[in-house]
Amino acid sequence: MLDAGMKTQLKAYLVNLRVPIKLVAYSDNGAKSHEMVDLLEDVVAASDKVSLTVKQPANGERVPSFDIVRTGSPEVAATFAGLPMGHEFTSLVLALLWVGGHPPKVEAETIEAVKALDIDGELRFETYFSLSCQNCPDVVQALNLMSVLNPKIKHVAIDGALFQAEVEARQVMAVPSIYLNGEVFGQGRMGLEEILAKIDTGAQA
């Protein structure tokens, strides 16, 4: 799936993993599922701290999709539905590193603010992206980081091209489009601080 240059690059990045991580993939016999598994096998080959389990969907998981989970701490996770290539390859690498314990390059006070969010129940974010979208990685990376830092925040980054029925049902007109607990949360480029402020405002409303 990855060319030789990308494999070398990935190996160099994944040296920074501090704790073991698991990739849990939900796959069928479709071509995109096979591509996803090929990609994840390349990730596993790049580090002995990464393992892969391929499953049939049992609880309504999207196919193809995969979770990146910290071994022994399943609440530390990020999820991709589709193939995070193109502009989203960086998002994949960062998610692997963050779940694997590598510290993010974010202000300490911002990290503490994410951890300290007073959340009633769970915040379940979904972001629709496209592989050619230049504004999408900022949003995907911000929400992935939040889902790694706070166990009450979950995030799935969804390649709209592979999940057309969802895109049409939700009338997603542009990417990135962000949903929170099934409702529209925002569209367009948003950074971590902006998302944080919007959640805080919503909590106080």
Image: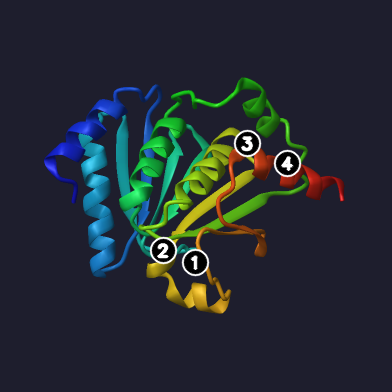
Along the line of sight, the residue nearer the viewer: 100 or 163: 163
Give the left or right position of residue 198, taking residue 92 as reference. Answer: right
Residue marked by disc 1: 60
**Which tag is nearer the camera, tag 3 or tag 2?**
3
Image quarter of residue 143: top right
Mark 4–mark 1 CB contact (< 8 Å): no
Specify the amino acid type for callout 3: Asn
Q: How far apart are marks 4 and 2 (CA)?
A: 35 Å
Determine the CA span between mark 2 and mark 1.
6 Å
- Asked if disc 3 and disc 4 are in contact, CB closer than 8 Å, the reply is no
At x 49%, y 66%, the residue is 60
Q: In this view, does 104 lie above or below 166?
A: above
User: 103 or 185, which is in the foreground?
Assistant: 185
| Mark number displayed over residue 57 | 2
Q: Is residue 14 visible?
A: yes
**Where does residue 117 sit, x and y in percent of width and height?**
73, 36
Q: Real-space Cα distance between discs 3 and 2? A: 26 Å
Look at the image and tell me whether residue 85 can be seen: no
Q: Mark 4 points at which residue?
A: 197
Tell me the residue at 35%/22% (across/down).
16
Query: Could you say where residue 135 lies in the image, as x and y percent from the top left?
Result: 48, 51
Earlier sequence position, callout 3 versus callout 2 = 2
**Badge number at residue 146:** none
Q: Earlier in the sequence, mark 3 or mark 4?
A: 3
The amino acid type of the residue labelled 1 equals Gly
Circle 4: residue type: Ala
